[in-house]
Every structure is written in C-alpha cells, then in structure tokens.
C-alpha cells in the first residue's frame, strides 16, 4: 500500500491526543513529523504533550517545537477545557529528547523536499506555524498536496466567543494567510465537529479494555466527564476526513475570516455557492461511521504492545 505522507500540526489538547493516537496506528499514513503550536495550552506544554503521546503509542516520530505566540495578538489558551497540563488528568515523566529544528523550518524543509510528490498537512490547532512557513517561504505551496484543518464556525456560534471558533480566534491573522494562500484546503468547522460527542459505548470500551493507551485516554477524558461534559473530539475529524473523506459532506465554498480587532474577530463567513470558492467546506458528518472508524483504529491499542 502506498502511504499518504503527512505532517500533523497540533496543540494537545485532549481531542488532539485522540486524533494523534488515531493517526499513529493508521497504516495508510506515514507521519513525517509532528509540529506543535501554542493554542489549547502554551507551546511548552503542547510540545511536551505531543512527545508524551508519541511515547504512549510506542512510536518513533520526531516532534518539532513551533511558534510561542500567534502572529500578531497575544496568546489565549483553553486550559479550562483541557486541564492545566492540557491532557486532562494524564501526566507522565521522562520525555524523549527534544529536536533542535523549529517547526516552521521543518514544514518548509519537508515541503521543499516533496515538490515531486507533495505532502498533506493536517492542522489541529491555530494556523500559526503553517502561516509562518508560507510567509517565510511561499514556494512551499508546490510541495503541499492538501491541507485539512479543524477550524471555523459557519452557521453556528463560536466556542470561544459568540463569533469565533477557538483555533481561528487564537490566530485569525494566520487563518487569513492560510485561507488566502491558494492551497487545496479542506476546512472542518465546529458545525460538524460538535457532532463528535464520545458515545458512552466507547467510554465503556475504554474502561473495560486492556493496554496503557486505553487507560491513558480514559484519564484524559475523565477531566471533562467529572465536570459533567460529554467530551467532543473535534480534531479527530481531520484524521477521519483524510482516511475516509466519504464520511463527510464536502462542498466548495468561499470562506472569509474576520481578522480585524473587535467583537467579531475570528469569525468565519461562509458565502453562498454562487461565489467563487477558495476552499472545501465540510458541512455534515456520518457520526456512526466516524465512531466506527475511531474504535476500529483504537483496537490496535487494545492489548499491551
Ligand atoms: Ca487542537
């Protein structure tokens, strides 16, 4: 099987963790590297958490530390959603060694080496690293086959302000750069990812299953469950869309992002189909098939490896 080469840019984050764990056991994917971005948590925590997850999955994937702040505005995190450490109640010591290469330079290097066979970039956090790479070296566009991003809110209120979904809210200027870069971009908005409440059946599978990954994910989800939330795993939609795009209703649309300071900053506006499209928008998800795919992939973690 020829595998799809990807970079995952992430700010783990409980839902990022599930997306990463899903990707790391998907045989169709070759993960060239993981890059971390400040978002749900600070860069330092995101970087440690991503390495923690690679270690948990017994993988040998390099993690590259990215931008410490958004391009223009100060960082706002979401530690109240993901726990102070970012992975709910999950913590570990003795992390793998750090890489010296910056995430932005890693993205540039990989894209420039892939001009013959362009790669896919999956973004699970604010778009700062990818935008900075595009600003620093616009030529990388030729090395990018596709970008799939969890970002935006089209026909519903945001989850961080009434106008904005978190990833866009944190760095609307980066979103503006990426959306207008002329890339093959698929945007999976909150309208769709809000439908990924973890079913009780999967929670039961986690608690009755064996293996350290199940136990770890249970700990991660426990933080939200204790607060009475039914966890949503927004970012896993990106990996699912890469593996099985047929699970989503995808439509070409023009989307613009409001990056002007004011109460609507970070708003994503979905224009009617009559306007010239600039991206592919996910409009609906087959929830049942999505969770089937997720639980199928997690079976790889069922017993100690
Ligand atoms: Ca995320």
Image: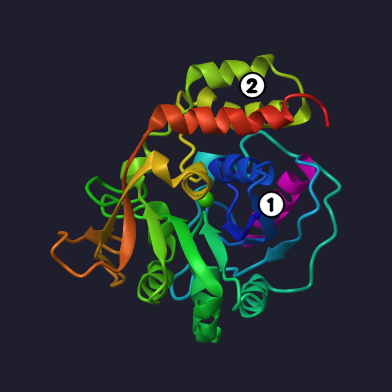
Q: Earlier in the sequence, mark 2 or mark 1?
A: 1
Total count of labels? 2
* Front-lying residue, 105 or 43: 105
How far, Cα to Cα, is label 2 from label 1? Answer: 21 Å
Nearest to the observer: residue 209 or residue 160: 209
Residue at 75% across, 41% down: 57
Question: Residue 260 occupies which quadrant of the picture?
Answer: bottom left
**Was residue 218 drawn as part of the magenta stretch in this picture?**
no
Left or right, 273 with respect to 184, comes to left
**Residue at which label 1 appears:** 50
Q: Where residue 270 sits in the image (x, y, percent)?
A: 22, 58
Say left or right for 270 vs 126. left
Per the image, label 2 sits on a secondary structure element best described as helix
- Local SS, label 1: helix
Question: Would the CB of label 2 be found within 8 Å of ligand 1?
Answer: no
How is the rendered protein coloured? rainbow
Residue 224 seen anywhere in this rendered image of the structure? no
Magenta residues (range): 43-56
The residue that label 2 is drawn on is 206
Look at 42% across and 26% down and name the residue there. Answer: 288
Callout 2 crowding tier (Cα within 10 Å): few <14, some 14–19, many ≥20: many
Q: Please state if 262 lies on the left or on the right of 287 as rendered.
A: left
Q: Look at the image and tell me in which quarter the C terminus lies.
A: top right
Q: Where's residue 108, x and y in %?
A: 62, 78
* Residue 53, placed above or below residue 293: below
Classified by dominant secondary structure, the portion drawn in magenta counts as helix
Image vertical order of residue 153 relative to residue 231, above or below: below
- Is 55 part of what is drawn in magenta? yes
Q: Position of residue 186 (x, y in %)?
A: 40, 58
> Residue 4, can we see it?
yes
């Amino acid at each position: 099987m020829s595998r799809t080469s990807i970079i995952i840019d992430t700010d783990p984050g409980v839902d990022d963790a599930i997306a990463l764990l899903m990707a790391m056991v998907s045989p169709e994917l070759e993960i060239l590297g993981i890059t971390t971005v400040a978002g749900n948590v600070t860069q330092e925590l995101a970087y440690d958490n991503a390495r923690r997850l690679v270690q948990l999955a017994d993988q040998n994937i390099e993690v590259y530390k990215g931008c410490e702040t958004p391009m223009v505005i100060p960082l706002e995190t979401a530690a109240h959603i993901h726990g102070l450490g970012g992975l709910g109640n999950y913590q570990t010591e003795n992390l793998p060694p750090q890489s010296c290469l910056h995430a932005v330079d890693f993205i540039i290097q990989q894209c420039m080496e892939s001009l013959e066979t362009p790669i896919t970039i999956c973004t699970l956090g604010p778009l700062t690293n990818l935008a900075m790479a595009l600003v620093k070296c616009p030529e990388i566009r030729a090395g990018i086959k596709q970008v799939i991003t969890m970002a935006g809110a089209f026909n519903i209120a945001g989850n961080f302000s009434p106008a904005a979904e978190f990833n866009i809210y944190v760095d609307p200027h980066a979103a503006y750069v990426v959306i207008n870069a002329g890339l093959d971009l698929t945007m999976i908005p909150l309208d769709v990812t809000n439908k990924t409440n973890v079913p009780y059946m999967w929670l039961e599978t986690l608690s009755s299953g064996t293996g350290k990954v199940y136990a770890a994910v249970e700990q991660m989800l426990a933080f939200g469950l204790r607060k009475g939330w039914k966890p949503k795993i927004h970012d896993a939609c990106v990996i699912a869309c890469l593996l099985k795009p047929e699970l989503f209703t995808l439509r070409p649309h023009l989307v613009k992002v409001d990056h002007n300071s004011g109460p609507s900053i970070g708003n994503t506006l979905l224009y009617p189909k009559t306007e010239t499209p600039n991206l592919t928008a996910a409009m609906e998800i087959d929830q049942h098939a999505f969770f089937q795919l997720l639980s199928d992939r997690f079976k790889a973690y069922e017993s100690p490896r």
